[in-house]
Amino acid sequence: MSLPLRLGVNIDHVATVRNARGGLNPDPLRAARLAIDCGADGITAHLREDRRHISDADIEALSALCRELGRPLNFEMAVTDEMRDIALRYSPHAACLVPEKREERTTDGGLDVVKGHNSIAPVVKVLREAGIRVSLFIEADPEQIATAASMGAQVVELHTGAFCDALREGHTDQADRLLQTLREGAAFAADLGLEVHAGHGIDYETVTAIAAIPQVVELNIGHFLIGEAIFLGLGEAMAKMRGLMQAARAIS
């Protein structure tokens, strides 16, 4: 039996557009409020070390808004002392630890928690002790998943980018293999007691297969929804995504 499936909306790229011109518009806080009004189950924001989109002031305002409206804020963050301290200052509902390279356009692949165990585990511990729910953005690899569980994370967010790229580009055999890896990873993570989320590269074409994985309880989608909002409006873009998610869940 499938579990209910939540939709988290990442508003990073509202800030990208704002920062391209400078000034105050478009306002990520307004986008977050609109997303919540339109039924988002939570808001995700990634404060990068170079502050290329979300700013410190955005995190402060989003933290206050999510508390006011009773929706969780998922704070995506690199595993650094600076980001750890910011998370501890604002105490979001969840902190998702992600890999970060200054030269990348977007997050490229999952966090290597096996190789980075000694630096990641202490951050997981201190965040958990502060009452923050810890998620690790990782590949659907059994060793990565087992290590995430062993270091005390409550959640894993499985990286779906490679699958989404393969499906969109028509590489059917590769997409099938990657989807099977995601399915097996989600089942393994759930068996270990981890809550399973998924994200990266999800759009209307790719969401159905991912949403049909029964152990996945949350999808975090940003760039695509913000882009579609230009043409449809954020509410309609979210409603279409939610409809596809629900249809996939009904037959999974």
Image: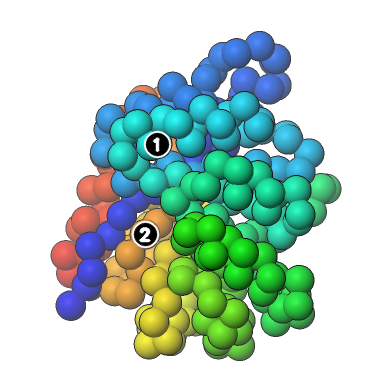
Q: Which residue is mark 1?
A: 66
Query: As drawn, is 190 to the left or to the right of 120?
Result: left
Looking at the rendered image, the disc whose residue lies closer to the viewer, 1 or 2, is 1
| Position of residue 168 measured from the top left corner of the image (x, y, whole percent) | 51, 57
Image quadrant assignment for residue 140: bottom right
User: CB atoms at circles 1 and 2 under 8 Å apart?
Assistant: no
> Foreground residue, 203 or 154?
154
Q: Secondary structure at mark 1?
A: helix
- Residue drawn at (29%, 74%) of the image: 214
Query: As drawn, is 163 to the left or to the right of 189?
Result: right
Q: On the rendered image, what quadrant is the N terminus found in?
A: bottom left
In the rendered image of this protein, does residue 197 appear above or below residue 149?
Answer: above
Q: How packed is label 1: few (under 14 Cα within 10 Å), some, or many (20 or more)?
A: many
Question: Is residue 171 among what the camera can see?
Answer: no
- Residue drawn at (34%, 42%) of the image: 71
Q: Which residue is mark 2?
A: 218
Q: On the rendered image, what quadrant is the C terminus found in?
A: bottom left
| Position of residue 223 measured from the top left corner of the image (x, y, whole percent) | 53, 41
Q: How packed is label 2: few (under 14 Cα within 10 Å), some, or many (20 or more)?
A: many
Query: How many numbered callouts?
Result: 2
> Foreground residue, 152 or 190?
152
| Mark 1: amino acid | Cys
| Position of residue 251 measured from the top left corner of the image (x, y, whole percent) | 18, 69
| Position of residue 247 measured from the top left corner of the image (x, y, whole percent) | 20, 58
Q: Earlier in the sequence, mark 1 or mark 2?
A: 1
> Given the current orientation, which residue lies at the most extreme front position?
129
| Mark 2: amino acid | Glu
> Foreground residue, 242 or 58?
58
Query: As drawn, is 1 to the left or to the right of 96?
Result: left
Q: Secondary structure at mark 2?
A: strand
> Given the current orientation, which residue lies at the most extreme right position?
103
- Residue drawn at (72%, 78%) of the image: 117
